Amino acid sequence: MNLKTLKNQSLCALTLCMALHAGSSLAKDFTEKQFTSQALGHGVYELAYDAGQKSLYAASAPSFDKDKTAGEVFQLAADSLKIDKRIATQRRPFAVSLDEPNHILWLGNALDGSLTLLDTRSHKELKTIQLANAENNAHVREVVLDKKHRRLYVSGIGSEGKGVLWVVDAQHQTLLHTHKQTDAVGFAVDEAGDKVYAVTGKGELITLDGKTSQILSRVNVDPAEPKHYFLNIALNTAKGVGFIADTNTADVLVVELASGKILHRVATPNSIAAVYNPARNEVYVTHRNARQISVIDASTYSLKHTIKTAAMPNSMVLSPDSKTLFVSVKQDEKASQADYVLKIDLTQF
């Protein structure tokens, strides 16, 4: 090897090293102290963003005691997180889904197996739809609205083999379909593609027809791992992939929506919720047990940032301009501190 070749190789190695160092320096760890937060109360769960009122809604089930069945919805100013209103509810809400044009906040009452329709202007309860019954006393876990087809998808968590998937006609506010033995847990809607995707506690991906709400396919995503318990899925429909959060096993699974095939495993702790941000091409994932939030590059599937939290991050909602991520953060059951909401400015990344 001559001197010229050696110099060229050395320069190439140096350039590669500098490029790798520059790339890694872009990744940065954050803590929640760098962002705005607001303490609320005990039993805070899912969030919804109302662009028209510039408000954030947070569902709260303050107690699991049988004799304390009332709940609460916090209405926060989206810019400051100031509590504008505390709305009392007859039942304990866990899940939320907002029908903004019709000013209805759909509340999933987990312990009662029912839905409550709350008027976002008058703050009055409009109606209660009872879904669970003596035959199947499933608990409501997730409610997701398909705005295009005016249907609400509701997961009912039951004992082994009794998990159900309810489909509610959002326009007429009546139960439309009951898919038994589905074990559906979380949903994501592809309105443009007329598809709804559900993930199950058995590690499956279910595809439904958005027009008819009928099941098109059901795939066991990773048969070699029986411990999977999928909680939520986020969609990058332009790329045809889904990001699955699993509460039982490590790693976020990147799957091909058409087949359920695993394309990649993003190395993370076990997870709760996932949100895709098309404007920034990022995926946000909450890791409750690890007390952190991951920011994942949706192109390379690499971890970009980690946000450390003092308590356990749970649910998320993205602002309409895609610049802010709101996260509900839960305390340990034995803690005296209140659950809180974290407002993450994504432009800091």
Image (cartoon, rainbow, N blue to C red):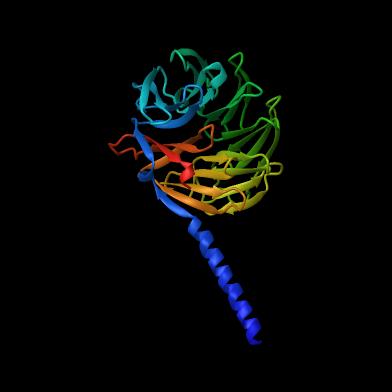
Above or below, 142 relative to 229: above
Question: 94 left or right of 6?
Answer: left
The foreground one among 164 and 54 is 54
Q: Position of residue 207 (x, y in %)?
A: 67, 35
Side (left or right) of 269 relative to 85: right
Residue at left offset 56%, top offset 64%: 19
**In-front residue for pair 52/245:** 52
Position in image of residue 195 (x %, y %): 68, 32
- Horizontal side of 76 relative to 3 (left or right) equals left
Q: From the viewer's perspective, tell me whether residue 246 is left or right of residue 292.
A: right
Query: From the image, which quarter does the N terminus lie in?
Result: bottom right
Up-down relation of residue 39 to residue 3 (above or below): above
Residue situated furthest left in the rendering: 336
Pick the front one: 57 or 290: 57
Q: Is residue 70 visible?
A: no
Residue at 60% x, 34% y: name it. Answer: 188
User: Residue 170: which quarter of the image?
Assistant: top right
Residue 22 position, x and y percent, is 52, 61
Residue, x 34% and y 22% (percent of image)?
68
Res. 38 image quadrant = top left
Which residue lies at the image location 37% right of the left edge and 45% below the top edge? 34
Whether residue 271 is visible, yes or no, is yes
Q: Position of residue 345 (x, y in %)?
A: 45, 40
